[in-house]
Amino acid sequence: MRDIVTKAKTRHEIGQDIKDIMERVKEVAERRERYKVDTIIPAKTSVDPRITSLYTKTADLFGIDEPREELITRLTKGDDMSMQQRIVSVVGFGGLGKTTLAKVMYDKLKGQFDCMAFILVGRNPDLKKVFKDMSIDLDTRFNVDVLDERQLIDKLQEFLENKRCVSSATK
């Protein structure tokens, strides 16, 4: 008899706990409905993960000197540096330090060229933003907000004509 009473008491407590849980679930559902949690859409903000590499101190980088000097040599040494266009590609898997290397090279070459620009270009670039960033870095002083892509290209070509430049665009 005692065993039956103990079991009944235990089952009653379990039943009461289940009722309490059910009440809490209902309260949460009502709150969810009241505050319209499902309709909240977080604002999408995209921050380029490479941006931090732009502000890394050169002294904090290990093993960057040799690749930087090789890159600079490929860009600046040769028979005729006056107007010869050179393009050097730095390729590899993500996270290897390509952007950091390009930025370190860019910082070291500052002052050796008539103009310089460092632009981050993503996988699906917004061309107007790329040209706008380039215009700002080059300090072109034309109103980039009112120009379309074609006009920006024309203005940039005109601005860069007969200038010795270095531009780093990383993808």
Image (cartoon, rainbow, N blue to C red):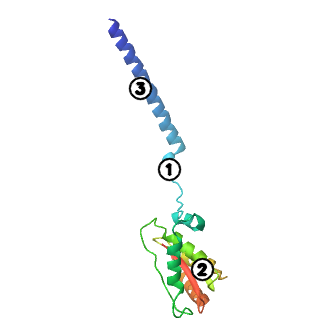
Distance Cα–Cα, label 2 vs label 3: 71 Å
SS for callout 2: helix
Residue 128, image quadrant: bottom right
Picture residue at 50% right of the left edge, 50% below the top: 39
- In the depicted view, which residue is nearer to us: 146 or 99? 99
Distance Cα–Cα, label 1 vs label 3: 30 Å
Q: Is residue 57 shown to the viewer in this render?
A: no
Identify the disc placed on residue 18: 3
Task: Specify the amino acid type for callout 1.
Answer: Thr
* 38 shown above or below 97: above
Picture residue at 54% right of the left edge, 60% below the top: 45
- In the depicted view, which residue is nearer to us: 50 or 5? 50
Identify the disc placed on residue 109: 2
Q: Position of residue 162 (x, y in %)?
A: 59, 93
Identify the disc placed on residue 39: 1
- In the depicted view, which residue is nearer to us: 135 or 63? 63
Task: Specify the amino acid type for callout 2.
Answer: Leu
- Furthest residue in direction right, as rendered: 141
Distance Cα–Cα, label 2 vs label 1: 51 Å
Task: Specify the amino acid type for callout 3.
Answer: Ile
SS for callout 1: helix
Residue 22, image quadrant: top left
The answer to which of marks 1 and 3 sits earlier in the sequence is 3
Q: Are marks 1 and 3 in contact (CB under 8 Å)?
A: no
Q: Mark 2, mark 3: which one is toward the viewer?
A: 2
The answer to which of marks 2 and 1 sits earlier in the sequence is 1
- Furthest residue in direction top, as rendered: 1
Left or right: where 6 falls relative to 87? left
* 17 shown above or below 39: above
Q: Are marks 2 and 3 in contact (CB under 8 Å)?
A: no
